[in-house]
Image: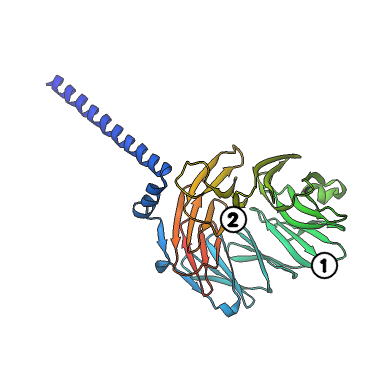
Amino acid sequence: MNKKNTKNKKIKKIILIVFLAIVLLAVIVVVGLYLGNSTIRLWMDKYILKRDIGEENLPFIEIEESDNVSAFAYSEYVATISNSTLTLYNSDANVVTTIDVTVTNPKFCANGRYLLVADEGGEDLYLIYNNSMQWHKQLEGNITQITVNQNGAVGVVITGTTHKSVIIEYNINGNEEFRTYLSTSTATDVAISEDNKYLSFVEIKTTGTVIESLVKTISIEKAKTTPNESMIYTYTTNSNTLILKIKYNDNKIVTYCDDGIHIFSNGNDEEILEIDNKINFADINLNGHICYISENKSGILNSEYELKIKNIENKKDNIHAISSGVKNLYCNNDIIAVSLGNEVEFVKTNGWLAKKFTSIQNIKDITIGDSVAGIIYKNKIEIISGL
């Protein structure tokens, strides 16, 4: 009897092992097909994973075109500014709060739960944390550039004073930490490191016949104590290269130039992408990655275009197939929105599709927060959540 029980247990164990092996093999095959075949991936996204959504079931915010509404998504909110009122909506399109602001030409910047709002060309600057106002400043001069890091440190560039540009850094409480003055050049972008130690800015020099484009890094601690020694790094580019945008990733400065994307770190310059006429769009506004749209020359995926997402540390690419021509590209943290006209594909930095949205109307613009996105039309803003 014991021998029979032992034999039955062995048979059951063998059957279980075979079953698990079959399941594992099936999972490997399905994942392989999903990753390697764009047609199967599209079918699975639509019918199995249910990632296709349409506008008919989405919550929306009604807007009047005549009100000239500006919208921006951050964290889990969609913010609108109209008629001197900042209104915050949740993912169900319900009003969370309203804040009075003096802003006629809104400029937004967000990082996590911090939203920085400026009156571009004006004097007013507001820092919002979560859904309440942290502080408000009225500056002397015209605001041109703003930034906020994940800790609530704020950088702002103003013009219209006796200097061509003035760069100011504020701490989380709105107290001024330091100022840097540019008398003969212009600051066109600014960024603050995640640990609050460094502020970097793009400087454009237009004296003479050649336009010179630089990135300069300031030690914030030295700027407060020994300002004459605060400039610790200066990164230069070729004379015919224009620096368009910078972003901190840890203590590395991801730099978007008109001919490539570079990493500036500890005085060193590393080009990680050369931008040529085969690259249609590129962006650096991602966590630990850059992305770009190019023609499909690799043949890895059956598609006309590819979205390539490059890890800036190991330089490896994740690839997502794009079936048609791209109209625009939007990025925030770990989500990329690829606009194809009346379709939008939301892609994660691992190359996998998060959502696919189809509209029957013409999409005016798209804005992405951490967990929500706003699809902006002339008469409403539809909210997509769960990204």
x and y percentages locating residue 351 in the rendered image? 49, 46
Which quadrant holds residue 244? bottom right
Mark 2 touching mark 1, by CB under 8 A?
Answer: no
Quarter holding the N terminus? top left
Q: Nearer the viewer, residue 227 or 332?
A: 332
Q: Residues within 10 Å of mark 1 (few under 14, many from 20)?
A: some
Query: Which comes before the other along the chain, label 2 or label 1?
Result: 2
Is the residue 11 above or below the residue 122 in the image? above
Element on which disc 2 rests? loop
Q: Residue furthest bottom?
A: 66
Q: Is residue 267 left or right of residue 292?
A: right
Q: Is residue 272 left or right of residue 77?
A: right
x and y percentages locating residue 235 in the rendered image? 77, 44
Q: Nearer the viewer, residue 80 or 243?
A: 243
Give me the C-alpha separation between circle 2 and circle 1. 31 Å
Tell me, for residue 213, which label it has, or none: none
x and y percentages locating residue 141 in the rendered image? 80, 68
Q: Nearer the viewer, mark 2 or mark 1?
A: 1
Element on which disc 1 rests? loop
Q: Is residue 187 left or right of residue 29?
A: right
* Amino acid bearing label 1: Gly
Q: Residue furthest left?
A: 1
Which quadrant holds residue 71? bottom right
Q: Which residue is mark 2?
A: 112
Residue 227 in sight from this viewpoint: yes
Q: Residues within 10 Å of mark 2 (few under 14, many from 20)?
A: some
Tell me, for residue 160, which label it has, or none: 1
x and y percentages locating residue 386 in the rendered image? 46, 57
Q: Nearer the viewer, residue 123 or 277?
A: 277
Is the residue 365 above or below the residue 152 in the image? below
Q: Identify the colour scheme used.
A: rainbow
* Amino acid bearing label 2: Gly
